[in-house]
Image (cartoon, helix red, strand yellow):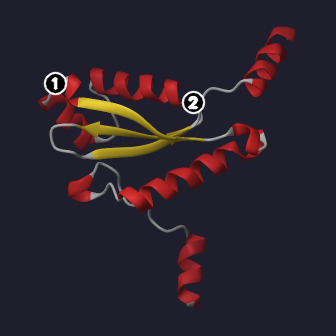
């Protein structure tokens, strides 16, 4: 049990890079924007899913299959400075960063592989009041 506590403490003291990434199809320019609390792990996960043919984004998967793997690139757009936030706030901070990049890049439709987020019930309720 002590080893587990040591690992948790080590993680909190030196977390992996977290932030927003972009997966780019260099043949057609389409992008997928996402975020993670572990960017190196997310890169490995994305590429593994694509190589194995099981990526949840079917359009991206189809383009991967029709192109060569080297036609795609993984880029970190922005990292979170973890010392500016408590560990409890990391997820929310990373989500806010992702929202900022989605708004800036608009990776939807012909421009990208992302799906526009549907408004939450709270956002729908507030828009009715406008």
- Element type at mark 2: loop
Residue at 75% over, 45% down: 85
In the picture of the structure, the residue carrying the numbered disc 2 is 38
Comparing 60 with 11, the one in front is 11
In the picture of the structure, the residue carrying the numbered disc 1 is 68
- Between marks 1 and 2, how big is the CA–CA gap? 26 Å
Q: Position of residue 61 (x, y in %)?
A: 24, 35
In this picture, residue 42 sits left or right of residue 11: left
Q: Position of residue 14 (x, y in %)?
A: 72, 24
Residue at 45% over, 44% down: 34
In this picture, residue 7 sits left or right of residue 130: right
Q: Position of residue 127 (x, y in %)?
A: 53, 83
Residue at 65% over, 50% down: 92
Residue at 35% over, 59% down: 106
Give the farthest residue toward the right.
2
Comparing 27 with 35, the one in front is 27
Give the farthest residue toward the bottom.
130
């Amino acid at each position: 049990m002590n080893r587990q506590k040591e690992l948790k403490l080590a993680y909190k003291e030196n977390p992996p890079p977290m932030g927003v990434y972009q997966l780019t199809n260099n043949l057609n320019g389409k992008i997928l924007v996402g975020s993670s609390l572990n960017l190196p792990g997310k890169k490995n996960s994305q590429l593994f899913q694509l190589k194995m043919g099981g990526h949840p984004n079917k359009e991206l998967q189809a383009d991967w299959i029709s192109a060569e793997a080297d036609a795609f690139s993984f880029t970190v757009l922005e990292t979170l400075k973890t010392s500016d936030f408590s560990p409890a706030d990391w997820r929310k901070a990373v989500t806010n960063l992702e929202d900022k990049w989605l708004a800036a890049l608009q990776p939807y439709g012909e421009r990208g592989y992302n799906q526009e987020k549907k408004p939450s019930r709270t956002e729908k309720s507030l828009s009715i009041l406008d």
